[in-house]
């Protein structure tokens, strides 16, 4: 009987492998930041791309930290992320190639309508100081952090640093909650605790307009709150078995005029404004200012979105 | 009220048999079904061996399977993640983030359930049946088959319990499956992810389906077992 079990298992496994290798459609595995997925934008992009090309897109929504980590291990063909600091290391260590900035929006500090810490109308640094002061007088949770090394979490740590705090010490204080999770989970927790949090505008708007949360966006559109999304391929020299050709096809699709239009218009009819702004054309035209300059200051490495040595010969992506 | 509204919308989605819901449900049934199939395929011979023979170390093996019943799915998921990832021992098969990885994980998860339950069921069959079958001229395999037939009730229960554990687990499917839409998204991972996305109606709809499947299959199998017993 064990013999029968062995033979059956072998036949089924061999059959599956042969099917996957020779008959199944080509796939791209893409790790992606949660904000792009949770707003539903990636769903639209997937639909549009798969109508055009016989390639299936498989998105794995995780925080930017893990997204890059998985790409480094060669589990992914490419990755969609929003943390220039992590991206820079990813390129410089030779794991990532062909970076393209595809979209931007702004982070926003959200909080309860009553705004007990009184941060409305302040700049980010002042606002964070107020939140800390207020938090220290409270016994409850006043700030909810993603706490997952995602792009948003990276940004948050950066903002605390700019405001003059030691993040490691700060995150241990009782009013600080470091276990928010994904963007959506964090918003729900902030809503339950009537707390403040840092969110990307796209996810916040979607949840707010869908009546899932009543928190207000208290501070928006400041230079330090800029949020830039990039796409980066995994280096085919390092992992020869990844699907690099199709990756480039998908990248060309992402930066094409049509897709950039799709990104810019996504959510406009439902939410009254764009959740994401297209970045390719503005960077080419060098307008609107000062936003383009902000993007360059924040997300360019050596005055380029992808320095020559990391372009892997795909110069046409950078015309 | 928002909650009632959400539940109503969820039922609407189910009635309209929304294509995404259908796809996720079928994938869930397929993945857990195949896992249960493999677990039974391997579990029954092991259980027959353990249940009809006496040998040194039998107690250790039985205890091992009994203990493994309680393994936390996230722990198993993590172990498999390390094994399947590129740097891991089975990395070259590129199993990570595929339905195959979930099937293997769930098979390992539920194999101990089948083995333990089925062994107990087989052990409680009168040993004379095997001897009787042999005296009547049955071969070894035929005699084992006779024992199996007597223990069928217990084995069916084991199969159902395994299937339910497989379809209801989240840890393995999330860690080694990655919840990829249209590829490895199953009921539990979709519920978790769609709740985080704020698609509460969809989550509720998937939750209702999951509950109906688990309850429905259990009830149906119990009914069949009762009917069979009555006929005897």
Image: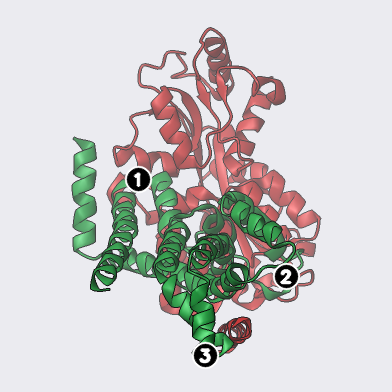
Could you say which is closer to the camera, residue B49 or residue A149? B49
Residue found farthest to the bottom: B137
Q: In this view, does A118 lie to the left or right of B171?
A: left
Tell me the distance, in whole angstroms, between the alpha carbons under discs 2 and 3. Answer: 43 Å
Q: Name the residue under label 1.
A: A273
Residue drawn at x 44%, y 74% is: A50
Q: What is the chain identity of the residue bearing mark 1?
A: A
Chain A drawn in what color? red
| Vertical comparison of A179 with B99: above or below | above
Q: Which mark is residue B90?
A: 2
Q: On the rendered image, what quadrant is the C terminus of chain A found in?
A: bottom right
Chain B drawn in what color? green
Q: On the rendered image, what quadrant is the N terminus of chain A found in?
A: bottom right
Q: Is mark 2 on a helix, strand or loop?
A: loop
| Vertical comparison of B211 with B119: above or below | above
Q: How is the image coloured?
A: by chain
* Labels 1 & 2 near each other (Cβ < 8 A): no
Picture coordinates of residue A237 (x, y %)?
Answer: 79, 72
Q: What element carries label 1?
A: loop
Tell me the distance, in whole angstroms, between the alpha carbons under discs 1 and 2. Answer: 47 Å
Is residue A97 visible in the rendered structure shown here?
A: no
Q: Mark 3 points at which residue?
A: B138
**Alpha-carbon neighbours of circle 3 within 10 Å: few (<14), some, or many (≥20)?**
some
**Alpha-carbon neighbours of circle 1 within 10 Å: few (<14), some, or many (≥20)?**
some
Q: What is the chain identity of the residue bearing mark 2?
A: B
- Both marks 1 and 2 on one chain: no
Q: What is the chain identity of the residue bearing mark 3?
A: B
Residue drawn at x 38%, y 65% is: B24
Q: Residue B201 carries which label?
A: none
């Amino acid at each position: 009987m064990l013999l029968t079990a062995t033979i059956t298992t072998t036949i089924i496994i061999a059959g599956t492998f042969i099917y996957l290798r020779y008959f199944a459609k080509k796939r791209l595995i893409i790790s992606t930041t949660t904000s792009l997925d949770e707003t539903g934008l990636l769903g639209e992009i997937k639909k549009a791309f798969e109508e055009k090309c016989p390639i299936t897109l498989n998105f794995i929504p995780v925080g930017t930290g893990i997204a890059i980590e998985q790409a480094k291990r060669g589990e992914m063909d490419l990755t969609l992320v929003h943390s220039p600091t992590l991206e820079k290391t990813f390129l410089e260590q030779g794991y990532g190639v062909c970076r393209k900035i595809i979209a931007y929006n702004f982070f926003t500090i959200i909080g309860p309508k009553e705004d007990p810490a009184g941060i409305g109308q302040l700049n980010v640094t002042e606002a964070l100081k107020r939140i800390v002061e207020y938090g220290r007088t409270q016994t409850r949770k006043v700030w909810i952090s993603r706490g997952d090394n995602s792009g948003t979490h990276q940004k948050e740590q950066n903002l605390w640093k700019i405001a003059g705090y030691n993040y490691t010490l700060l995150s241990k204080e009782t009013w600080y909650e470091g276990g928010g999770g994904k963007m959506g989970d964090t918003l729900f927790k902030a809503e339950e605790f009537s707390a403040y949090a840092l969110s990307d505008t796209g996810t916040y708007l979607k949840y707010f307009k869908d009546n899932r949360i009543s928190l207000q966006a208290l501070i928006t559109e400041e230079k330090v709150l800029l949020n830039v999304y990039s796409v980066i391929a995994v280096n085919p020299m390092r992992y020869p078995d990844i699907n690099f050709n199709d990756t480039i096809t998908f990248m060309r699709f992402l930066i094409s005029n049509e897709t950039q239009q799709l990104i810019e218009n996504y959510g406009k009819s439902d939410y009254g404004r764009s959740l994401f702004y297209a970045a390719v054309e503005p960077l080419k035209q060098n307008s609107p200012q000062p936003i383009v300059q902000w993007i360059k200051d924040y997300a360019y490495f050596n005055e380029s979105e992808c320095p020559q040595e990391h372009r892997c010969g795909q110069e046409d992506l950078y015309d | 009220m928002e909650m009632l509204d959400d539940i109503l919308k969820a039922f609407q989605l189910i009635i309209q048999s929304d294509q995404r819901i259908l796809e996720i449900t079928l994938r869930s049934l397929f993945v857990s079904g195949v896992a249960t199939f493999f677990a039974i395929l391997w579990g029954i011979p092991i259980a027959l061996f353990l249940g009809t023979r006496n040998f040194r170390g039998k107690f250790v093996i039985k205890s091992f399977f009994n203990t493994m019943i309680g393994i936390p799915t996230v722990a198993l998921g993590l172990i498999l993640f390390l094994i399947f990832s590129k740097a891991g021992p089975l990395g070259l098969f590129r199993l990570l983030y595929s339905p195959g990885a979930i099937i293997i994980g769930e098979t390992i998860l539920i194999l101990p359930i089948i083995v333990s339950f089925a062994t107990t069921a087989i052990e409680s069959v009168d040993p004379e049946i095997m001897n009787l079958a042999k005296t009547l001229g049955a071969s070894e395999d035929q005699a084992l088959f006779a024992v199996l037939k007597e223990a069928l009730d217990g084995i069916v229960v084991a199969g159902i319990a395994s299937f339910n554990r497989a379809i209801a687990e989240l840890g393995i499917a999330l860690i080694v499956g990655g919840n990829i839409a249209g590829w490895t998204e199953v009921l539990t991972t979709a519920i978790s992810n769609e709740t985080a996305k704020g698609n509460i109606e969809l989550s509720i709809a998937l939750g209702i389906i999951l509950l109906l499947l688990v309850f429905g299959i259990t009830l149906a199998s119990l009914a069949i077992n009762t009917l069979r017993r009555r006929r005897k």
